[in-house]
Amino acid sequence: MKRLFSSNLPAWFCCLFLAHASHAALFAPSDITDSVTRGLRVLRKGTVNYEDHRACFTCHHQTLPMLAQATALKHGFKIDDALFRQQTRITHDGFKNRKEKLRAGKGIGGQSMTVGYALWALHLAEWPSDETTDAMVDYLLATQRESGRFYTNKTRPPLEDSPAASAVIAAYYLQQFARGEQKAAARTSVAKALRWLSAYQPTRQEDLNARLWGLHLLGAKETSIEKARQAVLESQREDGGWAQLPDMESDAYATGQALWMLQETGFPTSDPAYQRGAAYLLRTQLNDGSWFVKTRSRAFQTQFESGFPHGRDQFISICGASWAVAALAPTAASEIR
């Protein structure tokens, strides 16, 4: 093998070169720009015609694509404003005629997970509190268990089976929309959720990711947040990605989510761990701009073609693409248009 260094070079120079090489960029800013742009394009393709097939709100076709769009916009990318408004309207319309059921704490498919995700979507759109969101907050307050946790659905992993994600999304977003007499109950709800989350032992990657995010959002001590952050970082794979479960391979869903929640809690995107994760996402993006994630959910609804690739795996794949775009966008240079 050809020698890297001449024996005549001083040792300090060799060490300096190696240190610089080990921190060399794994990708160019243009790679991020191209990837996020293509990702937004395929997300649009998969969501713009959603109303032609379904009239209900969904986490996978509204909240997470909206998260990708909102994060990209925050970091200088152009998004389809009309599409974002459409997704916001679909979300609100899905609940505005169900206020009585919401106040009664029943009659909602997906229960608190669905309502929590919907409030998250409305929060992304900066939607003001109104009678509909009041009823949604009432629903979450009524359905939180005394232990502090909320509903999960084991038949629809990974989107609905994480107790940590369910607790964080429901508690944090009900607090954001609570008003008037709801505010005192919301503070109690958040305190219960934080106690439960602090004691919870994660069993899946989404638990690890969401526990970190939740401890940050709900006001835990910095020592607890840092410990949760280290748990996420220690679960990173050699390929730079993260996997949904220990016996699974890395994918865009777990990787994008881990990265986005890391940076949301103050972890720098310039850190080598984040850069390796971003490089994994760039490496696994397909030519059409999407990422493939294999479904683990038990099918119970009639499949329809949304316009997003990957057939029966399209709904979890659109989630994976959303997380990937949301994770990559913050690594872009601030001058990106």
Image (cartoon, grey):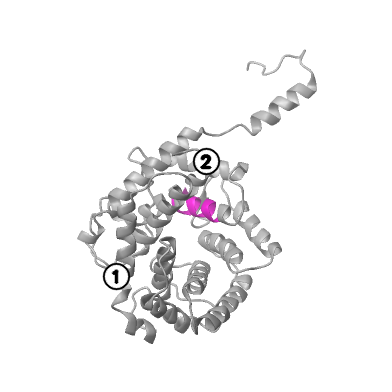
Name the residue tied to disc 1: 93
Give the left or right position of residue 328, taking residue 234 as reference.
left
**Relative to 37, residue 176 above or below:** below
**Relative to 104, residue 8 above or below:** above
Asked whether residue 17 appears in the rendered view, the answer is yes
Asked whether residue 249 appears in the rendered view, the answer is no
Quadrant of the image containing the N terminus: top right
Q: Amino acid at mark 2?
A: Ser
Residue 142 in the image, given as x and y percentages of width and height: 45, 84
Residue at image coords 39%, 56%: 66
What secondary structure do most residues of the magenta stretch adopt? helix
Q: Residues within 10 Å of mark 2 (few under 14, many from 20)?
A: few
Magenta span includes 260: yes
Q: Which mark is residue 334?
A: 2
Residue 329 in the image, given as x and y percentages of width and height: 48, 45
Q: Residue furthest bottom?
A: 104
Residue 72 in the image, given as x and y percentages of width and height: 44, 48
Name which of mark 1 and mark 2 comes first in the sequence: 1
Quadrant in the picture for residue 188: bottom right
**Relative to 258, residue 18 above or below:** above
Give the left or right position of residue 140, taking residue 269 as reference.
left
- Stretch of the chain drawn in magenta: 250-261
Q: Nearer the viewer, residue 200 or 117?
A: 117
Give the left or right position of residue 220, taking residue 317 as reference.
right
Residue 96 in the image, given as x and y percentages of width and height: 31, 75
Residue at image coords 59%, 57%: 265
Q: Residues within 10 Å of mark 1 (few under 14, many from 20)?
A: some
Q: Nearer the viewer, residue 331 or 259?
A: 331
Residue at image coords 62%, 43%: 271
* Secondary structure found at label 1: helix
Q: Amino acid at mark 1?
A: Asp
Residue at image coords 45%, 82%: 143
